[in-house]
Image (cartoon, helix red, strand yellow):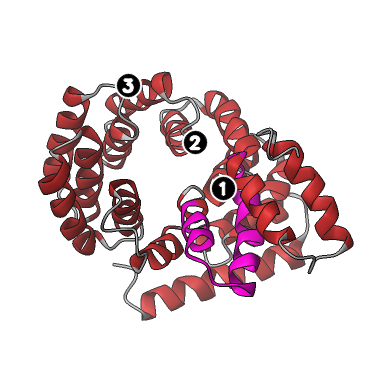
């Protein structure tokens, strides 16, 4: 009844209770996942939708799970689920989502064919210019990326992710003032863009204003508690400010979310050292060195 009245958050709470009592109750996982999805709580939607899909393969559930992954930055899984979607070729929004997932899972070359078809069918829109710009940036063509992103803003100043991507490129180039201007422009129109908010926090921290970064990161983590990079940066700043205990909390959470990130282990080791936890610190230093060595062996480090 709550779902029928579009009270999706309340419906999810009730379905959560039903699943706790009987996880295998027919349609319970599906209903729970759909309710979380419709309430835009995508991180919570992923697990029940995945269980529902495993129980009964279904194109609608697969599509919804793919979009939940897309909205939680799990781009490789989103792309894999959308690749063989029977509606993708006929539905521009699904084709766009698939191309976006490809770009953000470092498959920009595959994405270009998708977007070429979309441009031929629907014209050169602001949204397409944004994702093509992101594809160029991934391949190291920053000048081409900036041209496409500026074109996107000319077509539609409010288009999602254009200024955010410009801000990220400028940040990578060390152009902090330009990065900050672009990221604040993105957040003026899209305050719920947590990637842009995280990048802005990194910019102002690098610019010597860590106190401005802290509330930005706390806002990100309130909306996206599973954002490992935000927890890492928050922990790093807290450690530099002498708040080692809170830093440990954030960095331990970051390690759980991204156990293969060597930098997180290094910062956690430093935090443990500050607290006199030498054994735990040594373990993290060892993990840091092991991960760096693995990356060097595989050619990941220059």
Give the x, y percent position of residue 157. Answer: 26, 21
* Residue 227 badge: 1
Question: At numbered mark 1, what does the secondary structure look like: helix, strand or loop?
Answer: loop
Q: Is residue 269 left or right of residue 115?
A: right
Residue at image position (37%, 81%) is 297
Can you name the residue that lies furthest to the right here? 21
| Residue 25 within the magenta-colored segment of the rendering | no
| Residue extending furthest toward the top | 188
- Horizontal relation, residue 95 to residue 31: left or right: left
Q: Position of residue 167 (x, y in %)?
A: 31, 33
Q: Real-space Cα distance between discs 2 and 3?
A: 16 Å
Q: Residues within 10 Å of mark 3 (few under 14, many from 20)?
A: some
Name the mark on residue 181.
Answer: 3
The reply to whether callout 1 and callout 2 are in contact (CB within 8 Å) is yes
Q: Is mark 3 on a helix, strand or loop?
A: helix
Residue 298 or 226: which is nearer the viewer?
226
Task: Examine the rendered structure and indicate whether residue 200 appears above or below residue 78.
Answer: above
N-terminal-most mark, 2 or 3: 3
Alpha carbon of mark 1 to alpha carbon of mark 2: how far? 9 Å
Closer to the camera, 205 or 79?
79
Residue 135 percent coordinates (x, y): 22, 51
**Residue depicted at x 66% and y 46%:** 35
The answer to whether 90 appears left or right of 36 in the picture is left
Kindly indicate whether the residue at mark 1 contacts the one at mark 3 (C-beta within 8 angstroms).
no
- Disc 1 residue crowd, few under 14, some 14–19, many 20+, Cα 10 Å: many
Tell me the chief SS of the magenta region. Answer: helix
Q: Does the magenta stretch include residue 50?
A: yes
SS class, disc 2: helix
Q: Is residue 103 visible?
A: yes
Point out the stretch of residues depicted in magenta: 39-67
Dot 2 corresponds to which residue? 194
């Amino acid at each position: 009844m709550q779902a029928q009245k579009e009270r999706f958050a309340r419906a999810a709470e009730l379905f959560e209770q039903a699943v706790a009592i009987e996880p295998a109750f027919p349609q319970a996982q599906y209903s729970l996942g759909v309710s979380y999805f419709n309430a835009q709580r995508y991180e919570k939607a992923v697990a029940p939708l995945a269980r529902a899909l495993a129980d009964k393969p279904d194109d609608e559930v697969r599509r919804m799970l793919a979009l939940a992954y897309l909205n939680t930055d799990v781009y490789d899984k989103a792309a894999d689920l959308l690749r063989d979607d029977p509606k993708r070729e006929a539905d521009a929004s699904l084709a766009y989502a698939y191309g976006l997932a490809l770009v953000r899972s470092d498959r920009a070359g595959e994405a270009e064919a998708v977007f070429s078809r979309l441009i031929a069918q629907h014209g050169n829109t602001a949204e397409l210019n944004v994702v093509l710009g992101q594809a160029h940036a991934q391949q190291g063509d920053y000048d081409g990326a900036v041209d496409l992103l500026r074109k996107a803003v000319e077509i539609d100043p409010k288009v999602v992710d254009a200024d955010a991507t410009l801000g990220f490129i400028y940040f990578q180039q060390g152009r902090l003032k330009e990065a900050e201007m672009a990221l604040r422009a993105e957040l003026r129109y899209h305050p719920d863009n947590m990637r842009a908010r995280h990048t802005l926090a990194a910019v102002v921290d690098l610019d010597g204003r860590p106190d401005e970064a802290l509330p930005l990161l706390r806002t990100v983590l309130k909306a996206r508690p599973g954002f490992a990079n935000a927890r890492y940066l928050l922990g790093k700043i807290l450690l530099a400010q002498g708040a080692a205990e809170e830093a440990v909390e954030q960095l331990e959470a970051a390690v759980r979310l991204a156990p293969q990130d060597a930098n997180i282990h290094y910062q956690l080791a430093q935090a443990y050292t500050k607290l006199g936890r030498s054994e735990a610190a040594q373990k993290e230093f060892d993990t840091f060195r092991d991960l760096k060595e693995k990356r060097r062996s595989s050619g990941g480090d220059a």
